[in-house]
Amino acid sequence: AQSVTQLDSHVSVSEGTPVLLRCNYSSSYSPSLFWYVQHPNKGLQLLLKYTSAATLVKGINGFEAEFKKSETSFHLTKPSAHMSDAAEYFCAQGGRRALTFGSGTRLQVQP
Amino acid sequence: EPEVTQTPSHQVTQMGQEVILRCVPISNHLYFYWYRQILGQKVEFLVSFYNNEISEKSEIFDDQFSVERPDGSNFTLKIRSTKLEDSAMYFCASRAAERLNTEAFFGQGTRLTVV
């Protein structure tokens, strides 16, 4: 069975500093990987996805993620955090029928 | 931009009562899903639905759960006799295709509280 591990349940950064949210996935020949964001009282919004093209994937709102097969990682980064980035972030791996989610990382952005 | 919509946003129900959670998937999508997230836990897959039948279900999706597409637009999740442990956020999702790299579009969720 697939498993997705998000290594940090909470991350706190100051506005304007870099963001790193970590995700490790189940080893797979050709994984499909996604990052979703959930703002309070909102649904899950797709930030970006990896589909075996470029290993560095650019998403919305300045986020990007790097696929590293040797480390089975797909960490999410942003060079400079904004207050509006405060939310819950979920890493997910595509399966035959459904997505397998990590447990989520709550990002706090301090002024 | 097309979106998945869910109603209601919040539902409080007494234990043992039936609830129906409603979803309107994106109109040209063919694959529909329900996920749930118990407070503080992972988003978990419940069931997938295609061509008017369940294509896969998790061990969570026992006999008290059922899904239906009663018309051309709605997709519903029914919990026949709710338990306290059914309290969770329930997300509906839809996809245009069932390839691994096709993203799922999620609704804003229904928060179900069983008292």
Image: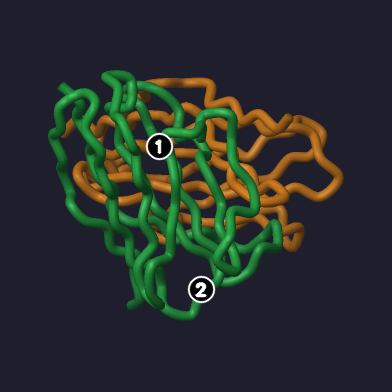
Chain colours: A orange, B green
The residue depicted at 34 percent of the width and 29 percent of the height is A106
Q: Is residue A20 visible from the viewing direction of this image?
A: no
Q: Is residue A52 left or right of residue B36?
A: right
Quarter-of-image position of residue A93: top right
Q: A70 or A1, which lies in front? A: A1
Residue labelled with disc 1: B36
Q: Is residue A2 left or right of residue A42?
A: right
| Amino acid type for the residue under numbered disc 1 | Arg
| Amino acid type for the residue under numbered disc 2 | His
Label 1 crowd (10 A; few <14 / some 14-19 / many >=20): many
Q: A14 or A108, which lies in front? A: A108
Residue labelled with disc 2: B29
Q: Which SS class for mark 2? A: loop
The residue depicted at 72 percent of the width and 50 percent of the height is A96
Q: Considering only vertical position in the picture, is A50 above or below B69?
A: above
Classify the position of the N terminus of chain A by image quarter. top right
Q: Which SS class for mark 1? A: strand
Which residue in the rendered view is the most extreme toward the right? A29
